[in-house]
Image: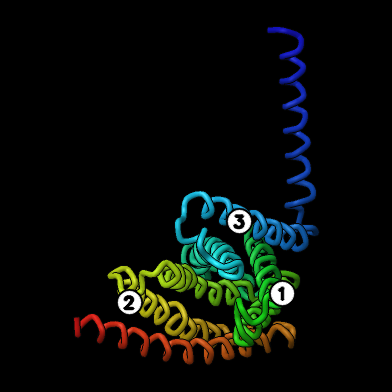
Amino acid sequence: MSTTSLQTIGAIKSYHHQAQHLVKNYLLADPFIPYTSVLTGIFLCKVVYDLCHFISNSHSKTYIILTKIQRIEWNNRGISTVHAIFISALSLYFVFWSDLFSDRWHNDLVVFRSSRLSSLGLGISIGYFLADLGMIFWKYPSLGGIEYIVHHSLSGVAVAYSLFSGEGQLYTYMVLISEITTPEINLRWYLDTAGMKKSLAYVVNGVFIFLAWLVARILLFIYMFYHVYLHYNQVMRMHIFGYVLVFGVPAALGVMNLIWFGKIVRGVKKTLAKRCEC
């Protein structure tokens, strides 16, 4: 093997070691996770936005005929879809499968438990909420009205408090499971934009939205409040601001979810009625 090749291999190993050192001692070090994870979330939003534009511009016939604002919304919905898949999967893991918040394996208070991974996930989610809020304000009201600003603001404040204080992360992840409905909502917009509003896929999508919304944004919120009731003696030990957030944010989001659910039910009825007439 030539001297040049050995030097190249040595340089690659050196860079690899330095990268590992950077990730371990800075990016994933406990004191830095809240900050690096938020910045990572914002950076990933930019990456996903550019990838959506590149892929759609190359492979979608619909994308190339859209207006500028429609393209921006197309790409922005790509970001929200990727974030929703990531955070809902992570939330389901922590709430139902991980031992981190299990009463069987821990004797400490569940409201004060956290881990590097749980904090990392919340930070990335905050980065998304900040980036999406920035997009909404930039193109207001084209990408969303006041209800989106209220939703993102409440969610962002609650997630940020949970990240930086380490309190109530279980309940934060319970609420974030509701993001599982976002891909279906975005798919509905994509189908409508592509002129497929009368297709079977549009009807099936509407049914899936109804079911997902009922489970993730109605029934799951009831379960969350039931869990809070069972662990109220622990919730009382949280800081007063965290205590208010545990009750206030899910309650406010729950009311919004019920209002939106009413619109979804009416939309599904209207769509099914048209299909039956045909």
Q: Is residue 116 left or right of residue 92?
A: right
To which residue does mark 3 refer? 48
Sequence-wise first label, 1 or 2: 1
Name which residue type carries label 3: Val
x, y (%) of residue 262? 42, 91
Q: Residues within 10 Å of mark 2 (few under 14, many from 20)?
A: many
Q: Residues within 10 Å of mark 3 (few under 14, many from 20)?
A: some
Quarter of the figure with the C terminus: bottom left
- Please name the residue shown 63% across and 62% down the image: 121
Q: Residues within 10 Å of mark 1 (few under 14, many from 20)?
A: few
x, y (%) of residue 55? 53, 51
Q: In the image, which is nearer the foreground, mark 1 or mark 3?
A: 1
Element assignment for label 1: helix
**Colour mode of the rendering:** rainbow
Element assignment for label 2: helix
* Image quadrant in which you'd find residue 271: bottom left
Labelled disc at residue 270: none
To which residue does mark 1 refer? 138
- Please name the residue shown 54% across and 61% down the image: 82
Q: Can see residue 99?
A: no
Name which residue type carries label 2: Val
In this rendered view, identify the residue nearer to me: 70 or 206: 70
Q: Is residue 234 left or right of residue 61?
A: right
To which residue does mark 2 refer? 207
Q: CA distance from mark 2 to mark 3?
A: 28 Å
- Please name the residue shown 71% across and 72% down the image: 134
Residue 230 vs 109, above or below: the answer is below
Quarter of the figure with the N terminus: top right
x, y (%) of residue 74? 54, 65
